[in-house]
Amino acid sequence: MRIVTILSGILMLLAGVWCFANPGASFLSLAFILGLVMIFAGGTGAINYFTEKNRKAEGSWVISESILTFILGGIVLSNQLLVDAMIAIFFGMWLIFSGCLRVVAAFQLKAQREENWIWTLGFGIVASLAGLYAFANANLFSWPVVLLAGGFFVIQGANVMVVGINMPHKKRKHQRRNKGEEE
């Protein structure tokens, strides 16, 4: 599941870059791809949560973010005009929630003495600040909607990639066997 989570983050990052590469396109023309990417990311997170053995240690934040991402992806697919009109608020809320999750996760990683906790904290703060900025700044509406969506997807894609990189992974049998022979 670690690889699938990293792939999910890469897809979100690529969706954001794709938005930057097509700044003249309307949101309605890109919404189908963005919605599918969100549904894939939400589904991946939910599957990862239920297959992970340490899910109680992570808390309900992980599954709630996955469910929110899945639902928002469905909304993007089904009601593109509404999302187009409220893009800063819609994706800003998503970034605030995900950013807060990353900050909480960073402190959990720190308590577990993981070395990469600072990256999770940094990306969580960036996501939270970008989401708050989207809520508080009315000037965002003068930006092209596709560029706003691209920025949100790049930030969220980086967040998901960091989560995937920090996920515990199982060592393969030959790695365990070689380690046992060295000791």
Image (cartoon, rainbow, N blue to C red):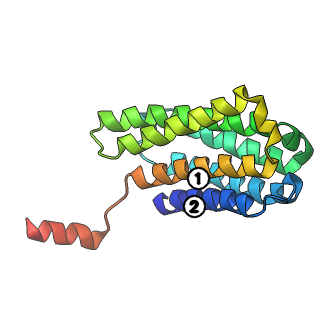
Q: Residues within 10 Å of mark 2 (few under 14, many from 20)?
A: some
In terms of depth relative to the viewer, which is nearer, 99 or 19?
Answer: 19
The answer to whether residue 136 shows anywhere in this view is yes
Query: Hey, which quadrant is residue 165 in on the image?
Result: bottom left
Q: Residue at x 49, y 63 (%)?
A: 3
Residue 76 lies, in percent from the top left, at 81, 47
Which residue in the protein does label 2 denote?
10
Question: Which residue extends farthest left?
Answer: 183
Please tell me which residue is depicted at 73% across the width and 64% down the height of the picture: 21
**Residue 86 placed where, x, y %?**
83, 36
* Tag 1: amino acid: Gly
**Where is residue 25 shown, x and y percent of the image?**
85, 59
Residue for badge 1: 157
User: Quick one: label 2 or label 1, which is nearer the N terminus?
Assistant: 2
Where in the figure is residue 100, as x and y percent of width and height? 54, 31
Q: Quadrant of the C terminus?
A: bottom left
Number of labelled discs? 2
Give the residue at the far top of this rendering: 136
Please give the label number shown on residue 34.
none
Q: Mark 2–mark 1 contact, CB under 8 Å?
A: yes
Q: Residue at x 61, y 39 (%)?
A: 65
Q: Which residue does the image show at 37% across and 57% down from the upper left? A: 169
